[in-house]
């Protein structure tokens, strides 16, 4: 599985990154040559427009791939509200499927392209 990491900065959870890379048995993709199956997107409230960030994350994502949006937990610097995430996801053409508390300082939301019904 190829996973692209976006939004890395010194405040990310290094232990979580290591766990993900250990599970992948590989490093993250930074310059994708082919489509990636997942994007790990670290995002803080002061990173700019979340819609733009999500659209950028879709650039190298495979059609059935997904985005794990990691944001600071409630009460932490850079927290992004659930409402802002839901609105940004909808505007970017994504749907939220799962959420998880992944570390003491970060939470994750899995975003996917909605399934299109066939007629």
Image: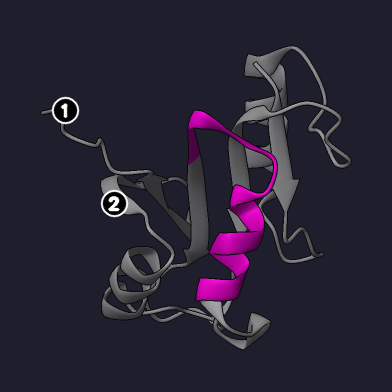
> Which residue is rendered at x = 79% and y = 32% of the image?
28
Where is residue 9 drawn, in percent x and y? 80, 64
| Range covered by the magenta-colored residues | 51-66
Viewer-proximal residue among 7 and 21: 7
Would residue 56 be counted in the magenta stretch?
A: yes
Tally the marks: 2
Colour convention: one colour
Viewer-proximal residue among 79 and 82: 82
Q: Residue furthest top?
A: 25
> Which residue is rendered at x = 53% and y = 75% of the image?
50
Using a 10 Å C-alpha cutoff, classify the residue at mark 2 as few (fewer than 14 neighbours), some (14 to 19) or many (20 or more). some
Which label belongs to residue 118?
A: 1
Q: Is residue 28 above or below residue 30?
A: above
Mark 2 or 1, closer to the camera: 1
From the viewer's perspective, tell me whether residue 112 is left or right of residue 16.
left
Residue 3's quadrant in the figure?
A: top right
Residue 60's quadrant in the figure?
A: top right
Viewer-proximal residue among 72 and 98: 98
Q: Which residue is mark 2?
A: 96
From the viewer's perspective, tell me whether residue 95 is left or right of residue 22.
left
Element carrying mark 2:
strand
Q: Is residue 11 above or below residue 58?
A: below
Viewer-proximal residue among 83 and 92: 92
Where is residue 13 drawn, in percent x and y? 66, 52
Would residue 79 be counted in the magenta stretch?
A: no
Res 105 visible: no
Where is residue 96 drawn, in percent x and y? 29, 51
Q: Is residue 31 above or below residue 49?
A: above
Which comes sooner in the sequence, label 2 or label 1?
2
> Which residue is rendered at x = 70% and y = 18% of the image?
22
Element carrying mark 1:
loop
């Amino acid at each position: 599985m190829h996973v692209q990491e976006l939004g890395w900065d010194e405040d990310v959870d290094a232990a979580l990154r290591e766990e993900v890379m250990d599970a992948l048995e590989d490093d993250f993709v930074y310059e994708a040559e082919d489509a990636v199956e997942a994007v790990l997107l670290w995002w803080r409230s002061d990173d700019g427009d979340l819609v733009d960030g999500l659209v950028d994350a879709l650039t190298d994502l495979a059609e059935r791939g997904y985005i794990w949006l990691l944001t600071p937990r409630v009460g932490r610097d850079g927290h992004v509200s659930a409402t802002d995430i839901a609105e940004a996801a909808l505007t970017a053409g994504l749907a939220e499927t799962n959420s998880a508390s992944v570390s003491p300082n970060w939470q994750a939301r899995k975003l996917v392209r909605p399934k299109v019904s066939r007629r």
